[in-house]
Amino acid sequence: MTKKIYSILLVIAMTALAALAGLKGDGTSDSDGLFHKKDHIVIWYTDDSLSDYLARAALQYYEEKDVRVTPVLVSGLQYLEQINDAQLSGEGAPDLYIISNDTLEKAYLSGLAAEITDPEGLVNNTIYSDAALHAVTYEDKLLGYPLYFETSIFLYNETYLRDMSIKTIEAEQNAAEGEAAMEMVEAAESDEELEALVSANAVEAAAGAVTEEQIREKEAQLVPVTMDGILTFADSYDAPETVEAVFKWDVSDIFYNYFIVGDSISVGGENGDDPAQIDIYNQRAVDCMTLYQQLNQFFSIDTKAVTYDSVLQEFIDGKIVFTVATTDAITKLEAAKQNGTFAYEYAMAPIPQVSDTLTSRSLSVTNAVVINGLSEKGDLANDFASYLIANQDKDFYSITDKIAPKTNIQYDNPAVYAALEEYAASIPVPKMMQTSNFWAQLEIAFTKIWTGSDVNEILSELDGGIRRQVSGNSLE
């Protein structure tokens, strides 16, 4: 409701400014008045959650720079085609727009994305992680200003781990006290001496009650750092009756599975734009996928029945201890806490490594502000894009529910920092048009391997098929 009211007030304010700008000094209307003499640029976007933020930024930019910006919400279907059609017709084409990094090659080769000028020098390693810079780089050119991202993250029920931490600490203390008691019995030379030792030990034990620092330290130790660690946790966990699965995730969606092979395969290299860097079938990838297949013996998850939404709901209901989620889960969990449907605390951590020798790496998508290469107002478009990211702060998250890739923003929720850490280590989704079907093919490969197909055969077929698509040659 607050957002709706805020949005209405922004619209009223912008309308008032427009009306005032069209008046003469005597207050009469002027079709050629000040408003029409103002510089004007148009920004397109496809996600309605950005509407309030862009409206506010446009208003502030107008007040500071005397330049009118019109945000236009459009359908995400055939997005670049819509931009091209508007450009050809000369009606309403955007001067800049927001788009995901996987379409940057297509946008650039179509002339619809120009290398950014970055007038304030903001797109650098001081403000952004390598993942953000790789995401917006194509053929060594920066083609966008990183605005927000999505990646996968390890989500866990902190209440369950806190309870387990306390029980573990108490068990350890009881064991230590038992050993100490035995030592006292053996050391005491009389009943009086034994009584004195027991009394002193009781005082010491009372002083050594479980502290918050101990709980947090133990909780950090209990969070699995490898997939084997999850299995070890499951073996020793005395689960509450509400828990139906220690670990469950959407094994049908490649976005939540990719971390298994993310550091073992390459499609286009770090920038996702190099057709010479195709490496899917290798020993590390085989080892990772073999372990993935073995997980089905411990976590029997039906690929046809599971969805991300169903898994997240089970987590909210307290039926799951660990899962793989995307950053949107933070907003959903906070909303569930507010309305009383989530009765626990949660936390996020980096995705566990595949094993002690095989590392994980999540997939990420970065949405960036891109300058239309065919616009005649490139300088103004670059200036507004730079203004957008320069003024991004924690309000961006509170208004849009999206996390900015900037590393210098302070947040209230520690889960956001965990997501930023995972994003910094992630691999951006590739940009190459020749591999646009790679994700569908990889998802099929994961499903086949999960249900028992030969790992070597599946990865070899996938590797050969993608190489043929990129090179046009028949490969063995």
Image (cartoon, rainbow, N blue to C red):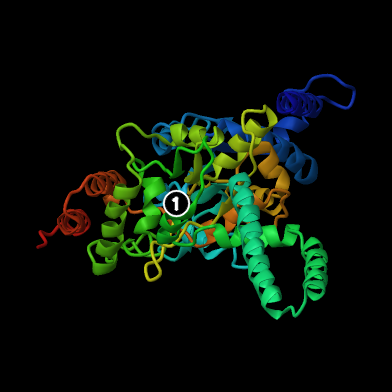
Q: Nearer the viewer, residue 447 or 362?
A: 447
Residue 95 seen from this side:
no
Horizontal placement of 155 versus 52: left or right? left
Label 1: which secondary element: helix
Image quadrant assignment for residue 272: bottom left
Residue located at (68% from left, 69% from top): 181
Above or below, comparing residue 245 to residue 24 in the picture: below
Horizontal placement of 359 versus 71: left or right? left
Q: Which residue is mark 1?
A: 234
Characterize the local packing of mark 1: few (<14), some (14-19) or many (20 or more) Cα atoms within 10 angstroms: some
Which residue reaches farthest right? 26
Q: Nearer the viewer, residue 351 or 31?
A: 351
Residue 331 coordinates in the image, percent (x, y):
61, 38
Residue 101 coordinates in the image, percent (x, y):
45, 50
Figure quadrant of the N terminus:
top right
Residue 206 coordinates in the image, percent (x, y):
80, 61
Horizontal placement of 465 versus 226: left or right? left
Above or below, comparing residue 198 to residue 456 in the picture: below
Residue located at (48% from left, 56% from top): 351
Residue located at (17% from left, 59% from top): 456
Residue 400 coordinates in the image, percent (x, y):
64, 38
Figure quadrant of the C terminus:
bottom left
